[in-house]
Image (tube, rainbow, N blue to C red):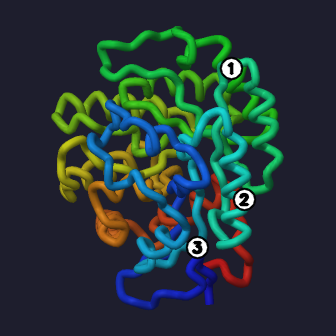
């Protein structure tokens, strides 16, 4: 019998075997997360988010995911106090010791600060550390971009910091709006030996035909670089309900652009829970892939994540 993070195996019809390649945990008493503990972020991409301004701990994740067989997970940095970037990794390492997951950590480090290498080197010392998510400076709208500004993907200091990922054998979790994807493609081209994974399907926030065409161009640009994968995740829109058909179009186009062998499933819980529950999310993605082979589906739901993040599953327990 395969091992899951719950310790059991769900034999119910429709239960999907998966690795969740992107989720968050937070303890607001033990740690400080400014966007959760302080004033709300006015530009949060889903609008009001009061429902997640509370603890989200391993027992909460296990409850949300109980309808499926989660082999392991990848925790992506959750914007903990940036003066304590390594402390988040230390806390998550203890969570893994006590609960058996997450199986890998994507930590945080700024690329353009004077202490960039100090923080990256410290993060790399943790056995579960696999990559860094460092958000470059981006614009709120396509017509407000400032290429070359400090902290952007053209900033020489930022690029020097980015180069450290190869030195420390770390990947980059790329999170930018779709109008910055062409710039991200340039970074991927400059650093072909650094594995990169695009977060949240490139944020196709504008679902008009023109908006989707712009998103598609950006996705094609970044997918042209063979070192880039994509997390097929987080389809939530600001002030809009989760819509199966609209999101199905996005999912199938992303798969067509990248090829399913470079697509990685992730939930982005608890954030995605503002729009959809865990079970419905997983079942929806499973339904969207109905035309794919079992081999492709296994790759999408867990094998591609295991490969990208170098996750260990005991041979006797691996599917």
| Above or below: residue 285 compared with residue 246 | below
Single out the mark in the foreground, 1 or 3.
Answer: 1
Please identify the quadrant where the N terminus is shown: bottom right
| Residue 273 appears anywhere in the view | yes
Q: Which one is earlier in the sequence, the residue at label 2 or at label 1? A: 2
Q: Badge 1: few (under 14), some or many (20 or more) residues near its Cα, within 10 Å?
A: few
Q: CA distance from mark 2 to mark 1?
A: 25 Å
The residue to which callout 1 is attached is 113
Of 107 and 58, the residue lying toward us: 58
User: Circles 2 and 1: CB distance less than 8 Å?
Assistant: no
User: Circles 2 and 3: CB distance less than 8 Å?
Assistant: no
Q: Please state the horizontal and vertical placement of residue 105, each as a whole percent of the image.
A: 66, 53
Q: Badge 2: few (under 14), some or many (20 or more) residues near its Cα, within 10 Å?
A: many
Q: Please state the horizontal and vertical placement of residue 7, each as a whole percent of the image.
A: 60, 84
The residue to which callout 2 is attached is 93
Q: How many numbered discs?
A: 3
Q: Which one is earlier in the sequence, the residue at label 1 or at label 3? A: 3
| Above or below: residue 216 compared with residue 137 | below
């Amino acid at each position: 019998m395969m091992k899951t993070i719950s310790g059991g195996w769900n034999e119910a019809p429709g239960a999907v075997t998966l690795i969740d390649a992107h989720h968050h945990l937070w303890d607001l008493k033990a740690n400080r997360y400014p966007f959760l503990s302080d004033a709300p972020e006015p530009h949060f991409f889903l609008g009001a988010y009061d429902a997640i301004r509370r603890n989200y701990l391993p027992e909460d994740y296990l409850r949300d995911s109980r309808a499926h067989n989660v082999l392991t997970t990848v925790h992506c940095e959750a914007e903990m106090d940036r003066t304590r970037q390594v402390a988040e990794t230390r806390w998550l390492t203890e969570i893994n010791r006590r609960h058996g997951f997450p199986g890998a950590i994507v930590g945080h480090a700024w690329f353009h600060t004077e202490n960039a290498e100090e923080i990256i080197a410290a993060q790399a010392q943790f056995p579960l550390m696999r990559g860094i998510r460092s958000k470059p400076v981006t614009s709120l709208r396509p017509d407000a971009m400032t290429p070359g500004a400090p902290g952007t993907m053209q900033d020489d200091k930022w690029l020097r910091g980015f180069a450290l990922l190869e030195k420390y054998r770390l990947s980059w979790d790329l999170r930018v709006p779709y109008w910055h994807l062409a710039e991200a493609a340039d970074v991927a081209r400059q650093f072909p030996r650094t594995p990169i994974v695009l977060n949240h399907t490139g944020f196709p926030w504008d679902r008009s035909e023109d908006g989707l065409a712009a998103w598609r161009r950006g996705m094609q640009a970044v997918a042209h670089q063979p070192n880039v994968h994509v997390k097929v995740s987080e389809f939530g829109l600001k002030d809009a309900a989760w819509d199966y058909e609209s999101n199905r179009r996005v999912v199938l186009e992303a798969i067509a652009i990248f090829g399913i062998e470079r697509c990685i499933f992730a939930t982005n819980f608890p954030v995605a829970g503002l729009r959809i529950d865990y079970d419905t999310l997983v079942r929806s993605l499973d339904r969207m892939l109905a035309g794919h082979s079992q081999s492709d589906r296994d790759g999408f739901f867990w094998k591609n994540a295991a490969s990208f993040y170098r996750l260990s599953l005991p041979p006797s327990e691996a599917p």
